Amino acid sequence: MYKEVYSHKKKYVEMKYGSLILEKREYVYLKRILNISGYAENHETRKCLMKLSEELKTAHIVDEEEMPEDVIRFNTMVTVEVLNSGLQRTLQLVIPIERDLAKNKISVLTPMGSALIGYSKDDTIEWDFPNGTQKIRIVEVTQQETFSGIDMII
């Protein structure tokens, strides 16, 4: 059921659905904020966001009612394991204005946020972070209330 997929500078070691899966409104919002962000000032962050932008070209876009429960989206709580170190961390992926590192809320425009969105539980990915290439396994995905204000933000 899992596929090995290769893409520009990123190797998906295991991917349940074969491509990113995004809910339609969240996809549109993400494309808009990527365009507005100018891919950030930091070179390494810019590289991560450019890779995400490339992945969006082949993403599977679905309606809200078709969105699998185990896919990471805005407001999702996700536990990841960095396979190189064994370190586990639980984060919440949020829109940029909701980020709060003290509460483990990371923006989709960060290297980790851009690495996670659209992936699902048990996927393992390899991603070029500012501190080097890391293999990450998605251990747990818990949906929170979806962000209803996306249409009003931009």
Image (tube, rainbow, N blue to C red):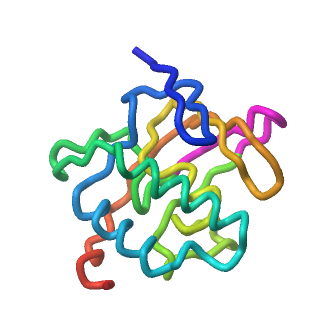
In the image, 25: left or right of 86? left
Q: What residue appears at the point 47 percent right and 43 percent down from the top-left corner?
A: 141
* Rendered view: 73 above or below 67: below
Q: Residue at x 56, y 31 (%)?
A: 12
Judge whether 39 appears above or below 77 on screen: below
How would you classify the magenta stretch by its main secondary structure?
strand
Looking at the image, the residue that sits furthest to the top is 1
Give the residue at x 54% y 24%.
14
Residue 41 placed where, x, y %? 67, 79
x, y percentage for residue 149?
28, 78
80 inside magenta stretch: yes
Total count of labels = 0
Q: Quadrant of the N terminus?
A: top left
Front-lying residue, 89 or 125: 125
Q: Position of residue 135 (x, y in %)?
A: 70, 35
Q: Quadrant of the C terminus?
A: bottom left
Q: Is residue 119 magenta?
A: no
The residues colored magenta run 78-88
- Looking at the image, which is closer to me, 59 or 73? 59
Q: Is residue 10 left or right of residue 25?
A: right
Tell me the residue at 78%/41% (across/down).
87
